Image: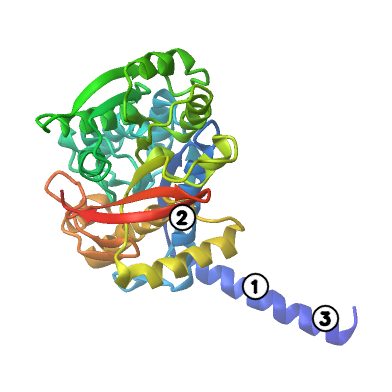
């Protein structure tokens, strides 16, 4: 080997060994993540995982000190396929892997049963997307969420349906999942007592349905001026196509499960202007738009795709865990858990602080519609 080449090689080797010795001395903090990486909700689960991974990268780039000592964060990501049974298996796997904090799950149907396993292990869990009120009504001290729940989403959608769209005859479809049924029930509850408004039909399907003609034929006979769907975009896409085939022109309302750009493709490549109105948990005011746009740019640079919506909440969930550990001076769950519960962390999605049962204080809900096949923001509401 040439002398200069050998010297350069030795210098590089010394630098490599020094770097790895230093990193080996850093304490390792393992953060879990779970969501559907396969199956119908894979695009949303991956969006969440990517957001969590971006947060881990940013934390390790600082670096972070806890009790004056450097730490290194590792993300252990698992696929639950949106299946409640697999969700509990994944939860136990993550507990066995000694994670010190959990981000997930994505679906309410997986988050709720998995939460029992995390609380038994004393592991703080923050869901970036599960909206069912049942999740935080179980009384588990380890359960938190960083987005609005179905009560808040259902209220925002019901107000829009009755006050802005002036709907009087409303049909409801839900997919019988914890998420879809929960959101539909909350929407219906907020219609009770509203003058001259009636639910003319409530139909049920599954989260894997593709043929909704029978349901829609029944609904069409009731002449609704609005249809509410509790479920995900994988079903909402065929639903929209079949509504068009049957000549149903009533607008379709729904929650975060249908509120992403993928819905256009799933609906056959075109959505009529104003046909779909949807609500996402969260939303930033004008003061936070610049930071959120920076996050979106960093996300696209890192992963080569655009944010769908949940990535920012997973990003904030990881950082809220890390912030609590730093302030507590410990990554031990029983030490940083009360600090997390008392958080006032300023994330890119807004101020993160929790109610006594782990819901987000003053949670935002953002309403969207589609124009020229692009999702467009209508309004942001808070705390209702």
Secondary element type, mark 1: helix
| Residue that appears at 77% across and 78% down | 9
Dot label at residue 16: 1
Query: Would residue 163 be seen by someone viewing this image from the given angle?
Result: yes
Q: Is residue 372 above or below residue 196?
A: below
**Residue marked by disc 2:** 51
Secondary element type, mark 3: helix
The image position of residue 205, as x and y in percent, is: 40, 18
Query: Would residue 70 be seen by someone viewing this image from the given angle?
Result: no
The image position of residue 208, as x and y in percent, is: 49, 22
- Figure quadrant of the N terminus: bottom right
* Whole-number angstrom distance, CA of label 1 to CA of label 3: 15 Å
| Residue that appears at 38% across and 28% down | 88
Of pointers 2 and 1, the one earlier in the residue sequence: 1
**Residue marked by disc 3:** 6
Of pointers 1 and 3, the one earlier in the residue sequence: 3
């Amino acid at each position: 080997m040439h002398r200069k080449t050998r010297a350069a090689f030795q210098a590089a080797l010394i630098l490599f060994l020094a770097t790895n010795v230093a990193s080996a001395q850093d304490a390792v903090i393992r953060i879990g993540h779970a969501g559907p990486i396969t199956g119908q909700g894979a695009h949303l689960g991956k969006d969440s995982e990517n957001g969590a991974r971006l947060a881990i990268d940013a934390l390790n780039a600082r670096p972070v000190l806890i009790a004056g000592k450097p730490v290194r964060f590792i993300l252990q990501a698992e696929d639950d396929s949106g299946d409640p049974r697999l969700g509990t298996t994944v939860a136990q796997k993550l507990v066995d892997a000694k994670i010190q904090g959990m981000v997930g799950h994505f679906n309410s149907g997986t988050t709720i049963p998995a939460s029992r396993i995390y609380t038994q292990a004393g592991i703080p869990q923050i869901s970036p997307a599960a909206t069912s009120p049942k999740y935080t009504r179980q009384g588990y001290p380890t359960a938190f969420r960083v987005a609005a729940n179905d009560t808040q989403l259902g209220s925002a959608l019901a107000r829009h349906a009755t006050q802005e769209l002036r709907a009087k005859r409303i049909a409801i479809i839900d997919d019988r999942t914890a998420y879809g049924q929960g959101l539909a029930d909350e929407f219906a509850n907020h219609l009770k007592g509203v003058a001259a408004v009636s639910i003319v039909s409530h139909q049920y399907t599954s989260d894997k349905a593709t043929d909704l003609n029978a349901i829609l034929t029944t609904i069409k006979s009731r002449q609704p001026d609005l249809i509410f769907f509790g479920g995900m975009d994988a079903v909402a896409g065929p639903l929209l196509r079949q509504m068009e085939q049957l000549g149903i022109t009533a607008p379709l309302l729904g929650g975060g499960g249908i509120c992403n750009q993928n819905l256009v493709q799933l609906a056959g490549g075109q959505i009529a202007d104003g046909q779909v109105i949807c609500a996402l948990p969260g939303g930033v005011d004008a003061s936070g738009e610049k930071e959120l746009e920076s996050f979106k740019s960093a996300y696209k640079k890192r992963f080569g795709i655009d944010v769908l919506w949940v990535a920012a909440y997973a990003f904030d969930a990881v950082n809220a865990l890390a912030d609590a550990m730093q302030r507590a001076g410990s990554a031990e769950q029983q030490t940083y858990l009360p600090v997390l519960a008392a958080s006032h962390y300023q994330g890119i999605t807004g101020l993160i602080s929790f109610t006594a049962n782990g819901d987000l204080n003053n949670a935002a809900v953002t309403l969207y519609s589609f124009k020229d096949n692009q999702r467009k923001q209508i309004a942001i509401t808070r705390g209702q």
